[in-house]
Amino acid sequence: MSQAELAVDAKAALGEGPSWDERNGCLYWVNIEEKTLHTYDVAAQKTVASISVPSRIGAVVPRRSGGTVIVLEDGFYACDPATGELIFLGNPDGRKPNTRFNDGKCDAAGRFWAGTMSLDGTPGQGALYCLEPDLTIRTVLENVSCSNGLAWSPDNRTMYYIDSPTKKVMAYDYDLATGEISNPRVVAEVTEPGAVPDGMTCDEEGMIWVALWGGYGIRRWNPATGELLLKVDVPAEQSSSCSFAGPDLDELYITSARTGISETSLANQPLAGGLFVYRSAVKGLPTYGFGG
């Protein structure tokens, strides 16, 4: 078992969505329930900005033209991570009421993929959307219960996707030129009691790294064979997402959460809600920015 180390003792209610901005050496991550966007300077190993946003924030990605793009409960926004200035970009047509955005990530062409989930846990109310660089929004998958991790293979020919309650990691053939997906199949399945797959990333060898909510850590799978290759221990039961960062893309940053954990259980995991880092022997793939 490999061990992750504490980077920030944030005690976040619901830490999520780490993404690496190589332009300024910063890792962005969000605290969904506390409606906060954090900027962490990887070289200096310190938080350099924490801004409040008007509603729950599901995910953040760098924007190629500067700043970031985020998803709030009512849609996509351009956001200045230093000041919190927001510009509304759009909200998907036909979104079901009583849902919020959750995880999201950009593909290599600069499309921002982000999905939703029900606020009260009703299954099948969410969907997966794609914000194109021209700011049009497509609905790609419907009847999703808790849209979560996204990743692409190094050759961009496969997209991986997680709807957490299914406990499965799905793969789709991916057309980078059009953003179309096809040929769904299961490439990994979580069988650990009480755990579900949450956020996800991919490394340069094409292996997937999946955060286990309820599983105290990260698992690395070979999506071609389904073989479990590595367990990374995190001292937080609700590990929520992960992203490679740093100048050599060999630092795996991991978010976690405290929400829903009893005081008795928190006493045994005082670092829950922290931001953690694992020094990897394998390099990750870049975080792509939004192209619009």
Image (spheres, rainbow, N blue to C red):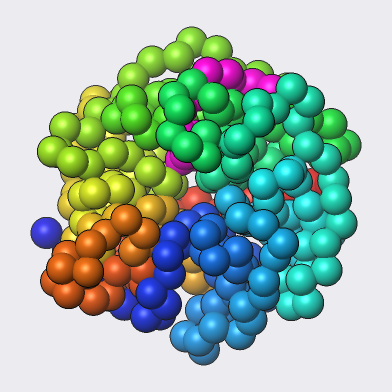
Specify whether residue 205 is in view: no
Please state, as top left, top right, bottom left or bottom right, where the N terminus lies in the image: bottom left
Q: Is residue 69 visible?
A: yes
Residue 106 sits in which quadrant? top right
- As drawn, 25 above or below 128: below
Q: How many dots with numbers?
A: 0
Verify whether residue 200 appears in magenta. Answer: no
Measuring 34% from the left and 45% from the top, which residue is drawn there?
A: 210
**To which quarter of the image does residue 97 belong?**
top right
Magenta-drawn segment: 139-153
Name the residue furthest top: 183
Q: Position of residue 266 (x, y in %)?
A: 22, 69
Verify whether residue 152 appears in magenta: yes
Residue 52 at x, y = what percent? 67, 71
Could you say which is closer to the camera, residue 173 or residue 81?
Answer: 81
Q: Position of residue 4 (x, y in %)?
A: 26, 68
Is residue 270 found left or right of 163 in the rendered image? left
Q: Residue at x 64, y 50 (%)?
A: 288
Where residue 180 sits, quadrant-wise, is top right
Q: Is 163 drawn above or below residue 186 in the view shown? A: below
Q: Give left or right: position of 156 versus 239.
A: right
- Where residue 61 appears, as percent x and y from the top left, is 65, 55
Vertical comparison of 4 with 222: above or below: below
Residue at (58%, 72%) from the top-left corner?
38
Magenta segment, prevailing SS (helix, strand or loop) = strand
- Residue at 49% x, 21% y: name it: 124
Along the line of sight, the residue nearer the viewer: 282 or 178: 178
